[in-house]
Image (tube, rainbow, N blue to C red):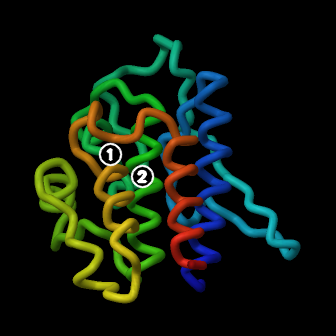
Amino acid sequence: MPVADVVQTLTTVAEALDHAHQQGVVHRDVKPANIMLTKDRIVKVMDFGIAKMASSSKTQTDLVLGTPTYMSPEQIAGKKVDGRSDIFSLGVVLFELLTGRPPFTADNLSALLFAIAHQPHPPLNELRKDLPPMFQEVLDRALQKELPRRYRRADEFARELRACLQNLAA
């Protein structure tokens, strides 16, 4: 996909996730396969099958659910998740769509989970020299390991993505 289409699509996904989060729903499995575009280019966020109500106490916090490549560090640790976990996963999707590869890779599942939880993602500008520095800043914030340093809400992420789109057009 062209960069502008990627950013526009993921901005819409971020807005949809923000709406879900405001209703107390955390998706917990944000990945490319769960983002669909209709023939009319309408973005749909699919498969809320493992979604969790943020206020629910029925799901164990030490239960790990999701697709490993797109999991947030707190999901891997089996900790309580909130919308910021979906933001991390959407950051992984953004990185992958911009570079053609996920930010964290390894030879086996244990090594992958360790990389996600403890290693920094590769610098975007090493893989895509054609993108403005703002893209690196947005990805760095979305992929923060520490929750307080990540975007608090998906609509903040969406606003920053829109700014990236405007930066591209300039």
- Reply above or below: 156 against 42: above
User: Which mark, residue 89?
Assistant: 2
Residue 69 is drawn in which quadrant?
A: bottom left
Given contact means CB atoms under 8 Å apart, are the residues at marks 2 and 1 in contact?
yes
Is 155 in front, or is 96? 155
Q: Residue at x 28, y 27 (%)?
A: 79
Give the image location of residue 7, x and y in percent: 57, 68
Q: Amino acid at mark 2?
A: Ser
Give the image location of residue 103, x and y in percent: 28, 68
- Judged from the image, the secondary structure of the residue bearing numbered disc 2 is helix
User: Which mark, residue 72?
Assistant: 1
Give the image location of residue 74, x and y in percent: 28, 36
- Reply above or below: 146 against 170: above
Relative to 123, 158 lies left or right: right
Q: Residue at x 63, y 61 (%)?
A: 35
Given the current orientation, which residue lies at the most extreme right position?
Answer: 40
Q: Earlier in the sequence, mark 2 or mark 1?
A: 1
Quadrant the C terminus occupies? bottom right
Residue 61 is drawn in which quadrant?
A: top left
- Reply above or below: 126 against 64: below
Quadrant the N terminus occupies? bottom right
Is 136 in front, or is 55? 136
Q: Residue at x 60, y 37 (%)?
A: 18
Q: Residue at x 41, y 54 (%)?
A: 67
Give the image location of residue 29, x and y in percent: 49, 48
Total marks in image: 2
Q: Amino acid at mark 1?
A: Ser
